[in-house]
Image (cartoon, rainbow, N blue to C red):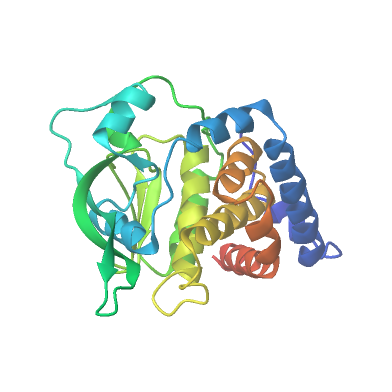
């Protein structure tokens, strides 16, 4: 489905932008809650439950070695539990696995005390994008189709971002990424126009909020992804591009505890950033 630029409808006098954004945000909250109650989300949670939580240090190690990683596990876990084979030639991600120890120590008075300590060893894990095999439950539906104002909107987003935006081949499942260290946005080659616009807005939101010294630079990865995709949903809705099938699942997937906690806590930041991008698009 193609539509004209949203500001031709929503930028009219007498239609406050704040009201539109509040209405769109409410629709997002309701859509995410509906995902939590769906059978598709239950299957996704069952799958996610087979993965271990990783420490902040290991998350940092994973990010440094493979920034687009989403789900990692050891070779045997992929093969035996998840029925997926790590592809030949894939480079392992190194993380640290704790090794607890304990022993009884007797002091000079004959008292016995149990002493515990932990050492670490390097182990190999692999991201899901490095594997093939059984189908993985997914709560995302990639956007298809064209967009009438594709070129002009993409040009406007490049102006708003303040960093270069390029379209290039990307290995793995990521549709795009923002690199704070290189101050650039890369969008995956071969996406539909609709998915490219949505991904571009998502990464522009990252470039505004999560750049070095950005307002939300220190937020957790879950919160950052919820923020960026929520902004993308609001801006794309304003543009007349319906991303509900993708955005609702994406936000739900990054929200913890089966509720839209991050979304609700970040509502003001999300709305402010969406407004900033919309204002920039109107100016462009």
Q: Is the C terminus in the top left, top right, bottom left or bottom right quadrant?
A: bottom right
Instruction: Identify the image quadrant of residue 58.
Output: bottom left
Q: Position of residue 46 (x, y in %)?
A: 54, 31
Instruction: Identify the image quadrant of residue 270.
Output: bottom right
Q: Nearer the viewer, residue 238 or 61?
A: 61
Let me know if residue 73 appears in the view. Answer: yes
Q: Position of residue 246 (x, y in %)?
A: 58, 38
Horizontal arrangement in the rendering, residue 39 relative to residue 192 (left or right):
right
Horizontal arrangement in the rendering, residue 268 relative to residue 69 (left or right):
right
Q: Residue furthest right?
A: 14
Vertical placement of 140 versus 162: above or below? above
Vertical placement of 115 versus 177: above or below? below
Vertical placement of 244 versus 58: above or below? above
Q: Nearer the viewer, residue 97 or 141?
A: 97
Q: Position of residue 250 (x, y in %)?
A: 56, 44
How many numbered marks does the figure carry?
0
Q: Residue furthest left?
A: 89
Task: Tell me what residue is drawn at x 35 percent, y 21 percent.
Answer: 83
Vertical placement of 239 versus 82: above or below? below
Let me know if residue 156 appears in the view. Answer: no
Q: Position of residue 173 (x, y in %)?
A: 37, 38
Task: Tell me what residue is drawn at x 74 percent, y 55 percent.
Answer: 25
Instruction: Identify the image quadrant of residue 44.
Output: top right
Horizontal arrangement in the rendering, residue 133 relative to residue 253 (left or right):
left
Task: Tell me what residue is drawn at x 34 percent, y 46 percent.
Answer: 69
Task: Tell me what residue is drawn at x 49 percent, y 64 percent.
Answer: 220
Q: Is the N terminus in the top left, top right, bottom left or bottom right quadrant?
A: top right
Q: Residue furthest front?
A: 109
């Amino acid at each position: 489905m193609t539509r004209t630029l949203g500001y031709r409808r929503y930028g009219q006098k007498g239609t406050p932008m704040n009201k539109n954004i509040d209405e769109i945000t409410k629709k997002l909250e309701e859509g995410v809650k509906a995902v939590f109650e769906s059978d598709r989300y239950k299957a996704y949670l069952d799958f996610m439950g087979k993965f271990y939580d990783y420490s902040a240090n290991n998350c940092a190690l994973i990010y440094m070695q493979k920034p687009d990683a989403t789900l990692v596990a050891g070779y045997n876990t992929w093969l035996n539990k998840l029925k997926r084979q790590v592809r030949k030639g894939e480079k392992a991600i190194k993380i640290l696995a704790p090794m607890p120890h304990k022993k009884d120590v007797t002091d000079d008075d004959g008292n016995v005390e149990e002493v515990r300590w932990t050492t670490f060893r390097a182990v190999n894990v692999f991201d899901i994008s490095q594997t093939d095999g059984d189908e993985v439950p997914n709560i995302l539906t990639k956007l298809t189709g064209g967009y009438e104002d594709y070129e002009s909107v993409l040009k406007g987003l490049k102006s708003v971002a303040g960093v270069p935006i390029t379209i290039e081949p990307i290995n793995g499942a990521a549709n795009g990424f923002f690199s704070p260290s290189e101050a650039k946005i890369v969008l995956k080659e071969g996406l539909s126009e609709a998915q490219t616009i949505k991904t571009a807005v998502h990464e522009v939101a990252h470039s505004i909020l999560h750049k070095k010294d950005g307002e939300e630079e220190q937020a957790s990865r879950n919160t950052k992804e919820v923020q960026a995709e929520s902004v993308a949903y609001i801006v794309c809705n304003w543009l007349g591009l319906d991303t509900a099938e993708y955005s609702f699942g994406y936000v739900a997937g990054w929200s913890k505890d089966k509720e839209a906690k991050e979304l609700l806590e970040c509502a003001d930041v999300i709305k402010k950033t969406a407004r900033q991008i919309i204002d920039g698009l109107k100016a462009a």
